[in-house]
Each structure stands twice: as structure tokens, then as C-alpha cells.
Amino acid sequence: MNKHLSGLMERYPVLKPLRDEIMNAFDALTQSYRNDGKLLVCGNGGSAADADHIVGELMKGFYLKRELDSNVKQKFGSLGDKLQGALPAISLTHHTALSTAFQNDVDPSLIYAQQVFGYGKCGDVLFAISTSGNSLNIINAIKIAKASGLVTIGLTGRSGGEMMDLCDICINVPSDITAEVQELHLPVYHTLCAMLEEEFFGI
């Protein structure tokens, strides 16, 4: 087992039943990145903060420095010494002008679906976060993602809600209390980010 995943299981035994789902999510993300895909992430409230957090861990060094290859460094001159390897990821939670305009002019429940439609391409991955698994704007984003050929990964609470059957992969942590669900989401996505970093930037 991957050392990061093994460490997660040791620190959070309650997550052991989700080992296969976490590994499946890692495999899907790895395949997408190997084929020049990208990750789109969305959530509401605390899960919106988690979406931003995930992007922050993927787009720059997390555990590793991710130093660029010397040939790549030369391309960017002196700036290349400070740039780090990145795994392309976009949080759909910001974009204030777009989101507020779409909410006002079209439909608030489609603010993420519109961005998935605009950014997503076949082979990309949508990482959708909802503690209940039933958030309408998240469900709509997943539906558009699936219709567009994206792989859908859900991060939810115990029941999984509607996302349990809708997502290609659903990681439903064992709690029904929003704060506790969010507390368990963080080590799951930290582990996925660490696994991906080691896969693409490890020695």
C-alpha cells in the first residue's frame, strides 16, 4: 500500500473501509494527469474552503519542493529557479463576477455546472464536495461533468446522499455531523494530494 495511504489508515482507523475508494480516486486522478487532464473542484461553505485548499496543495509544492528540470528552468530564465512543478487544478468557488452574474441572470443552482461546461473536457476530473451529498448546485455540476466525459469523484458524509449513486467514485466518510464530516474530509484529500505529488514529482 502507498505509504501515505497506509499512514492515513493508521492515524484514522475509522477510514479503513474507504481504502479502496481512496485508491480508486488516486488512480483516476493519476490517469487524468498522465493524459494532460486537469482537476475541477467545487463545494459550498466549508467545503468551498476545502476546494481551495486542494488546489493549493496540487498547484505548488506540498511535501516536496518540485524543482523544475534544468531544461525547463532555462526556458524561464531566472524565474525558473523559483517556479515549482504543478498539477493543474481549478477551484470553481471564486470567479465572483461570473458566479453572481449567472445567479442573477440565469439560475443559482447552475453556478458550478456552467463552469464545468466551460472548463471541462473529456478525461478531466471533477472533485465534488458535499457533506450531505445532496447539494443541488453540486449535483448539477456532477450531471454536466458526466455528460461531458469527465470522471466524477464525490467526497461526502456517511449516507452519500444522491452523490452516492451519481458519482463514478464516492468517498463517504463515516459521520452525519457536518463539522465531523469536514474534519474527516481534510485528511482524505491531504493524502490524495500527497500520493499524487509523490507519483509525479517523487525521485
Image (cartoon, helix red, strand yellow):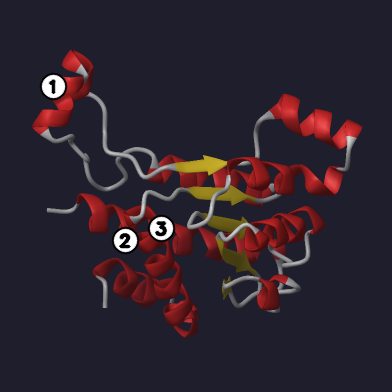
Question: Marks 1/3: CA distance?
Answer: 28 Å
Q: Please name the amino acid that badge 2 sits on.
A: Met
Q: Which residue is drawn at 21% across and 49% down?
A: 201
Q: Residue at x 18, y 36 (%)?
A: 67
Res 129 visible: no
Residue 32 badge: 3
Q: Which residue is drawn at 73% across and 29% down?
A: 98
Helix, strand or loop at mark 1: helix
Helix, strand or loop at mark 2: helix
Q: For the residues carrying marks 2 and 1, which lies nearer the camera in this image?
A: 1
Q: Please name the amino acid that badge 3 sits on.
A: Ser
**Label 2 packing within 10 angstroms: few (<14), some (14-19), many (20+):** many
Q: Mark 2 points at which residue?
A: 195
**Label 1 packing within 10 angstroms: few (<14), some (14-19), many (20+):** few
| Badge 2 or badge 3: first in the primary sequence | 3
> Which residue occupies the extreme bottom position in the image?
17
Measured as percent of width and height from the top left, residue 134 is found at: 78, 66
Question: Marks 2/3: CA distance?
Answer: 14 Å
Q: Is residue 48 above or below residue 160?
A: above
| Badge 1 or badge 3: first in the primary sequence | 3
Q: In this view, does 138 lie above or below 165?
A: above
| Badge 2 or badge 1: first in the primary sequence | 1
Helix, strand or loop at mark 3: helix
Measured as percent of width and height from the top left, residue 159 is found at: 70, 79
Can you tell which quarter of the image residue 167 is in? bottom right
Q: Residue at x 34, y 76 (%)?
A: 10
Q: Name the residue under label 1.
A: 74
Indicate the quadrant containing the N terminus: top left, top right, bottom left or bottom right: bottom left
**Label 3 packing within 10 angstroms: few (<14), some (14-19), many (20+):** some
Residue 87 badge: none
Apparent side of residue 78 relative to residue 32 in the rendered image (left or right): left
Contact between labelled residues 3 and 2, with CB atoms less than 8 Å apart: no
